[in-house]
Image (cartoon, rainbow, N blue to C red):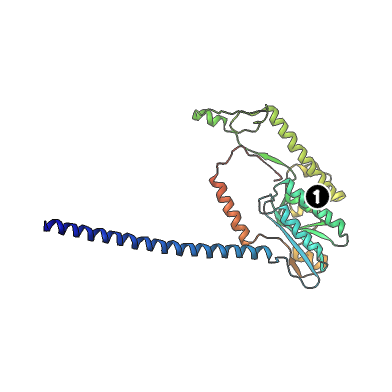
Amino acid sequence: MANLETDRRMNHAIEGEIIESLAYESLKERKRARRWGIFFKLFFSAYLLVILLAVFIDRSPVSVGRHTALVDVQGVIAANGDVTADTVTAGLQAAFENDNAAGVIVRINSPGGSPVQAGYINDEIQRLRMQHPDRPIYAVVSDICASGGYYVAVAADKIFANRASIVGSIGVLMDGFGFVGTMEKLGVERRLIIAGEHKAMLDPFSPEDSVGAEHAQKLVDKVHQQFIKVVREGRGNRLVDREDIFSGLFWTGEEALELGLVDEMGSTGYVAREVIGAEKIVDYTQRESWMELFAKEIGASLANILPMSLLQRNLSLK
């Protein structure tokens, strides 16, 4: 009887210790959760504060006195690329709005890209030139001004380049791949349901559609003719009458000068100092803040997680 009583007391004590231990752990967990809650609240408050600062802080260039305005076109021209029409035109508008800007330089180092984005920039340069006829705008080529980059350059009053610059590549391409033979070797069957007989005309996993290929060629030729028209209008009688100029070939700056693709040899500093007559250069290029770059990286990471279609084809001025 005594043993039973002793066992009961021991069990009761053990139960008490277990309950006490569970209560203690629960209390610790709540404290830990409270600390993390405070941390995340502070983190998101700081995050929102940084976003608000990035939005409301004026990032336009501060200029004092007479100067030359500079807008960079550096990299691939695309809606989500290194250079977008929105950022370039915003920089150009800010430059032309400043009465202290004696002239504007568009410094180009681009292999080309989207004909649409390049076209937007070309149109905006021409619009600003009409609004400000007394304000010169010059294109200065650094390493490369090809295809879409040249599409932008021809809108300027004059084009300057270095002897070793690469200029030209006036052409259009549409690229892709064909995997039909590979699928046959692997024993993979293509199952495709479409509405519209040529809807899948550029599908890389199906045999080439001759009608679709012909249609795509006409589309590319049409955009090429638009490109040629813009170049002819921009360069006028300065352009040498040679058909290979529009063949997609590219040349050094020296050769481009002989062909009328550029007007003179000169750097950004030379044009500001000797041509515009305002040696001080103020950069009006609209660059993404680190917050915008961070958001873009997050978006790119999410896009990499999502399934990507191999059916995409890009029309490019490259």
Q: Is residue 164 visible?
A: no
Residue 229's quadrant in the figure? top right
Q: Is residue 305 visible?
A: yes
Outermost residue toward the front in this view? 1
Q: Residue at x 63, y 39 (%)?
A: 312
Which of 189/208 is in front?
189
- Decide if residue 56 is on the left or right side of residue 244: left
Look at label 1 and name its amino acid.
Answer: Leu
Query: Quick one: SS at disc 1?
Result: helix
Q: Quadrant of the N terminus?
A: bottom left
Residue 101's quadrant in the figure? bottom right
Q: Residue at x 75, y 51 (%)?
A: 150
Residue 160's quadrant in the figure? bottom right
- Decide if residue 177 is on the left or right side of residue 317: left
Number of numbered discs overlaid on the protein picture: 1
Residue identifier under label 1: 259
Q: Position of residue 171 (x, y in %)?
A: 74, 43
Q: Residue at x 82, y 69 (%)?
A: 100
Q: Position of residue 25 (x, y in %)?
A: 35, 61
Q: Position of residue 252 (x, y in %)?
A: 73, 52
Which of 19/304 is in front?
19
Q: Position of residue 72 (x, y in %)?
A: 72, 59
Residues packed near mark 1 inside 10 Å, few (<14), some (14 to 19) or many (20 plus): some
Q: Is residue 61 above or below residue 11?
A: below
